[in-house]
Image (cartoon, helix red, strand yellow):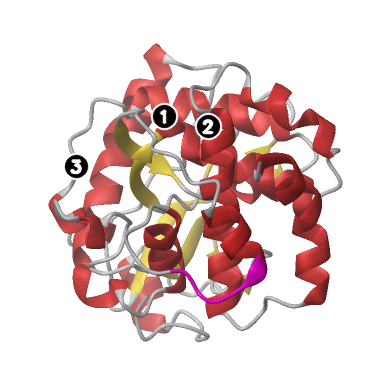
Amino acid sequence: MTGARGSVPGAEALRAFGVAGSTPVPLAGGRGLTWRAGGIVLRPHDGVAVTDWRAGVLAELDHAAESEHPAEFRTPRPVPTRDGSWRSGDWEAWEFVPGVADESRVEDVIRAGRAFHRAIADLERPAFLGTDPGTSTGVTASSAATDPWARADQMAWGEEPLPSDPTLDRLATAFRPVRAPSQLVHGDLLGNVLFADGQPPTIIDWPPYWRPAGFGTAIAAVDAVCWHGVPVGRLDALGDDEPEWRQLLVRALVFRIATLHQLGAWDATCVARHRPVVDVVAV
């Protein structure tokens, strides 16, 4: 992200996005970086290439959703500045859509995520992801080396060495080739699907990855079991005939654990939370 990390949208950004005079209010989630002002949500943008591409894709997808999949999911409309840009300084903006995340509704999250992945399945790999394994996530090659999520994704797919850790060593022995084709996927679904009465689920904060679509489902399933009280016995049902499900769960576990390592947050509590899933899939 850009230099806006930890700051509040200023008057210039508010004017640019048409909400001059509004007082930004911090929103829950979004790693403390997201603000509501009037009818829009502002967040630090992810760089010119990623931000402009994603806004363009979702602007078209939002229009198509009205006729093609009106009951399956929706996405917030990206908000352009007064001069037609998708960015003002360090900020991007989206329409505010009412709703709350509910991680206990993991089946509904996965259902919405699958519909979203079907809707974007024919999109080509964007240039900012590159064509080499080192740029498989929604960051530029120059930032991939320091972005914990990008590096963890590469570790999960054998493109970067794993940190030295007994749990990761155990999971690495379970690695098998994954033959499912890659496409654009949402890599953080569980807390980024909002529910509101009478409305389709709203998918927000899309970090684009170029992986098998089932990888996004597996990350949501792992998150639900490890952090939100979903019984480990529901893991197979959450896969629902997903090709190579157990292998995708292995990769999802490595992705989350490797991220926690790089953030300095992998501790005994995290080990205990992940152990039941590791015991199931690392065989």
Locate residue 110 relative to residue 244 in the image: left or right: right
Question: What residue is pinned by disc 2?
Answer: 113
Of the two numbered discs 3 and 2 on the same chain, state the one appearing first in sequence: 2
Mark 2 in CB contact with mark 1 (< 8 angstroms): yes
* Mark 3, secondary structure of its residue: loop
For label 3, count other residues whose C-alpha is less than 10 Å away and answer few (under 14), some (14-19) or many (20+): some
Taking the magenta stretch, the answer to whether it contains residue 38 is: no
Of the two numbered discs 1 and 3 on the same chain, state the one appearing first in sequence: 1
Disc on res. 125: 3
Locate residue 198 relative to residue 6 in the image: left or right: right
For label 1, count other residues whose C-alpha is less than 10 Å away and answer few (under 14), some (14-19) or many (20+): many
Q: Which residue is at the front of the view, 222 or 97?
A: 222
The quarter of the picture where residue 199 lies is top right
* Mark 2, secondary structure of its residue: helix
Q: Residue at x 43, y 83 (%)?
A: 10
Residue 96 rendering spot, x and y as whole percentages: 54, 50
Is 182 located above or below residue 164 in the figure? above
Q: Which residue is at the front of the view, 81 or 283?
A: 283
Is 156 located above or below residue 219 in the figure? below
Quadrant showing the C terminus: top right
Identity of the amino acid at label 2? Answer: Gly
* Mark 1, secondary structure of its residue: helix
- Disc 2/disc 1 C-alpha distance (Å): 6 Å
Q: Residue at x 59, y 63 (%)?
A: 168
Residue 97 seen: no
- Disc 3/disc 2 C-alpha distance (Å): 19 Å
Question: What residue is pinned by disc 1?
Answer: 117
Identity of the amino acid at label 1? Answer: His
Residue 40 rendering spot, x and y as whole percentages: 49, 57
Residue 118 rendering spot, x and y as whole percentages: 39, 22
Extent of the magenta region: 162-166
